[in-house]
Image (cartoon, grey):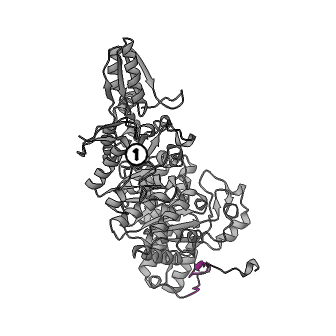
Amino acid sequence: MADQDLPVIAKFAVRRRAYLAPDGSVLRELPDFAADQNLVVSLYRAMVLTRTFDLKAVSLQRTGRLGTYATSLGQEAVAVGIASAMQPEDALFPSYRDNAALLWRGVTMEEILLFWGGDERGSRWSGPTHDFPFCIPVGSQAPHAAGVAYAFKYRKESRVAVCILGDGATSKGDVSEAMNFAGVWKLPLVFVINNNQWAISVPLKLQTASQTLAQKAIAAGFSGEQVDGNDVIAVRAGVDAAIASARAGEGPRLIEAVTYRLSDHTTADDASRYRPAEEVKERWKEEPIVRLRTYLVGRMNWSKKEEEKVTGECEERVETAIKRYLAAPPRPPESMFDHLYARLPSAYAAQRKEIEDQNA
Amino acid sequence: MPEVTLVDAINLALARALADDPNVVVFGDDVGVNGGVFRATAGLQQRFGVERVFDTPLSEALISGLCVGMAAQGLRPVGEIQFMGFLYPCIDQLVNHASRLRNRTQGRLSCPMVLRTPHGAGIRAPEHHSEATEAMLTHIPGLRVVIPSVPERAYGLLLAAIRDPDPVVFLEPTRIYRAVKGEVEDTGEALPLDVAFVVREGRDVTLISWGAMVKDTLEAADELAADGIDAEVIDLATLKPYDEQAILDSVAKTGRMCDRARGCAYRRIRR
């Protein structure tokens, strides 16, 4: 018998979700929430705020007032769509590019700036106290999300953990291990891959030979869906469905949000060294904010006046936050010991005193 | 009082912690039905159920990372790494997350977890089953590193580690899992962490040791006594942060010190 006659024992499919075309036109029947003007406007406002904030944060870095910063330029729909689908009691596990998700959940811009400026007070934030701080070592927050999801399930709480990862993170063992465990235990855990095509200078084709990143879920025993990551309606709808399924006890899901990093990786990067300008120029045609604005104008009579009001408010909020950030008094150096342990062991007390005395 | 082995004392402490606190969960490779390759978790899954005592997929980084997430959510996770030679995938989680979650969130989140692992050589096992690399772990601020030397302290220190509000790596000296016996009363009482134990008083020289080497050190002290040298023996027990005062007090009395531990010669542990 020839090999091609051997029986097929498993078949899998990966679906793709998209509602708004790059020109703002509607591709298929919209989810119900897309008719809720207040909600759509709040999504739009959050994306505009993120872009305004990002631009100012970069200029703070360029003028030496912020150590480094990772912008979401072109990817605003991903984190906004995710966070808007979550309940406050759900738990977020953000990677470093998910400023927009933190803002939606109540973390202030001043706190985010403190974090990027190297001040841990930024992670003792106004957002949900159970959310995890930004994860810098790529993908290493995925096992934390699994641990928290296990705790939710163990205590029979109706809560979901949401872990946001980049395309590069899908190459990490931590991520595979966490997905594998989540599948075995049917944990209330949603993984979202922000596939922005570039892990600093490494393009997706050098990251993986997988046709999609969504299919990485299949090996772990749950389903993966691809969504247009520049269509906030699609991100929100995809994550909504995944969270609802996880909350109903049906186990984990994975969403791959396909987008594009229009900016450098961080302020410490220069993408022009490895990425052709023509590619970036083409991708600007697909960016999410113009797309949603076109939808608002076409479907919801979004006026120039309303547009100006949103941009004006965002500018003002960002300016206020930056003033607060710049006015924040520096931490005393000895405070580095204050949260090292619940009770500082005597071994460190002497070090703390030494530093305190030097700076007295 | 019943005489038990050191591994039995570990099992007693785990059972006590599970019985006393519904937030305690115990997991790792083969810890469930099989009860652990050294039998440290024998009978626990049968007694406390599969949600509280369970087998994980074979992924050490996951085991340590799960601990971080669970601990931040108020559980008291006790993860097992089957041999110390398999601990190294956990270093990322221990250094970047467990030991500094409290600091990097300025106290908003904390990490009361325990990672248990067998320690040391002497059981005629291959290299990765014989590791003694505790010195490395003692260089991680925010972490505790604890190792018992007798059943009584295995029981009391493990309970203390589980109840501690910060992360603890709990090393279990494989060579004496069954080679030492001692009386352990299952009272649920913990012993203090960060405190060294003077296990033999003496005037002439201070011998510092930990884990399986404490037994050898006590035997050495007996030999010295035959030569008229009166040695004091300290079981350091908590390696990070170690009890410097206990050492200073002893050396102030004896004027001499010698440390005996497994691991490479340049094994400086760090308070």
Q: Is residue A56 or residue A247 the one in the foreground?
A: A247
Q: Is residue A303 above or below residue B269?
A: below
User: Secondary structure under badge 1?
Assistant: helix
User: What kind of residue is marked 1?
Assistant: Asn
Residues in magenta? A10-28
Instruction: Tell me the chief SS of the magenta region.
Output: loop
Placement of the N terminus of chain A among the 4 image quadrants: bottom right
Q: Position of residue B246 (x, y in %)?
A: 33, 25
Q: Is residue A15 above or below residue B64?
A: below
Count of marks placed on residues = 1
Q: Is residue A334 above or below residue A114?
A: above
Q: Position of residue A6 (x, y in %)?
A: 70, 79
Identify residue for label 1. B103
Q: Residues within 10 Å of mark 1 (few under 14, many from 20)?
A: many
User: Is any atom of residue A82 visible in this view?
Assistant: yes
Q: Is residue B134 or residue A134 the one in the foreground?
A: B134
Instruction: Say which chain tag 1 marks.
Output: B
Q: Is residue A226 or residue B79 the one in the foreground?
A: B79
In reply to whether residue A15 is colored magenta, the answer given is yes
Q: Determine the image quadrant of residue A92.
A: bottom left
Residue located at (54% from left, 41% from top) = B125
In the displayed orientation, state which residue is furthest to the bottom: A29
Q: Is residue B142 above or below residue B31?
A: above
Q: Position of residue A150 (x, y in %)?
A: 40, 63
In reply to whether residue B127 is colored magenta, the answer given is no
